[in-house]
Image: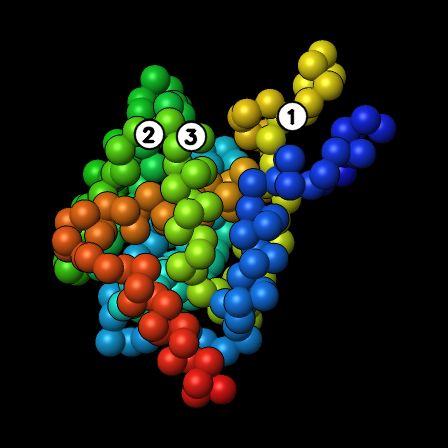
Amino acid sequence: EYPSTVSEAFLSSSDAYYFQMCIEQSYKENRMLSISVYDACFPVYVSMDIGVNDLTVMTFFQVVHGEIRIIDYYEDSNKGVEFYVRFLLKDKNYIYHTIFLPHDSAKRDAVIVENVYCREFQKLLSHTDTRVVVLKSTDKNINISNAKIKFTRCVFNLNRVSNLIKWLNKYRKKWSEQYGKYLDEPLHDMSSHYAMSFIYAMQAVSHIETVTGNKGALQKHKDAVDSRKKAI
């Protein structure tokens, strides 16, 4: 959360924090809203950063006319798949299209966790129309870059996701005392769980738009923002 050395403190935040400028721009462009951006006519997607013995963070989002709506988030720790499925179906009043799980190297007892989660989610959601997709393994810096690009299309419901935004704002690069600069790799700390859940959501948007063949998403988003401004 804070610089660990004096020299680190004097570097500009734009050198270190991945999403800080994106968040500032979102406020300027009126994309941080205190009203609900949820539309019951469109499906809801969920991306998860899975913490085996750590924090699990879910990001709930919709893709509406090219606009990415971050409608909700949830965090918990040391819970199993059954708990999360029950929570999604009982405590969150959404109709889910797809649950997106991460493709990572986390293991427990020599078992690849994302595969276990995928099978368990599929089994427990088999009575619903909800799909479960494991995202492809992709270079982390490419995923971060993709998330920063898509941030320009994101609209946030601050009443629901303000804590998610707070931690996104703290997600930063590693500092190297040896080289006196930030390295081109993220620091793993508390903010990582929130950031990865959001980053996976943006990777999921790429998947959704590839599968659905969605064209002109950015222009549709701009039209939606302009329409909202006129309504205000």
Residue sitting nearer the eye, 199 or 148: 148
Question: For the residues marked 3 and 1, what is the alpha-carbon distance in whole angstroms?
Answer: 16 Å
Q: Quadrant of residue 69?
A: bottom left
Three-letter code for the amino acid on which mark 3 is drawn: Lys
Residue furthest to the top in view is 178
Neighbor class of circle 2 (other Cα within 10 Å; few <14, some 14-19, many 20+) is: few
Q: Identify residue for label 3.
A: 140
Residue sitting nearer the eye, 123 or 131: 131
Residue drawn at the location 77% of the way across and 29% of the way down: 8
Residue 232 position within the rendered picture, expressed as x and y whole percent measured from the top left? 49, 86
Q: Which mark is residue 138?
A: 2
| Mark 1 or mark 2: whose residue is earlier in sequence | 2
Q: Identify residue for label 1.
A: 182
**Mark 3 falls on what kind of element?**
helix
Three-letter code for the amino acid on which mark 1 is drawn: Tyr
Q: Nearer the viewer, mark 1 or mark 2?
A: 1
Residue furthest to the bottom in view is 231
Neighbor class of circle 1 (other Cα within 10 Å; few <14, some 14-19, many 20+) is: some
Residue 118 position within the rendered picture, expressed as x and y whole percent measured from the top left? 25, 39
> Can I make out residue 182 in this image?
yes
Three-letter code for the amino acid on which mark 2 is drawn: Thr
Residue 90 position within the rendered picture, expressed as x and y whole percent measured from the top left? 34, 66
Q: Which mark is residue 26?
A: none
Q: Are marks 2 and 3 in contact (CB under 8 Å)?
A: yes
Residue drawn at the location 45% of the way across and 53% of the way down: 151
Residue drawn at the location 38% of the way across and 80% of the way down: 227
Left/right placement of residue 61 relative to residue 57 reads: left
Residue 162 position within the rendered picture, expressed as x and y whole percent measured from the top left? 58, 62
Residue drawn at the location 44% of the way across and 30% of the way down: 141
> Can I make out residue 132 in this image?
no
Question: For the residues marked 2 and 3, what is the alpha-carbon distance in whole angstroms?
Answer: 6 Å
Question: For the residues marked 1 and 2, what is the alpha-carbon distance in whole angstroms?
Answer: 22 Å
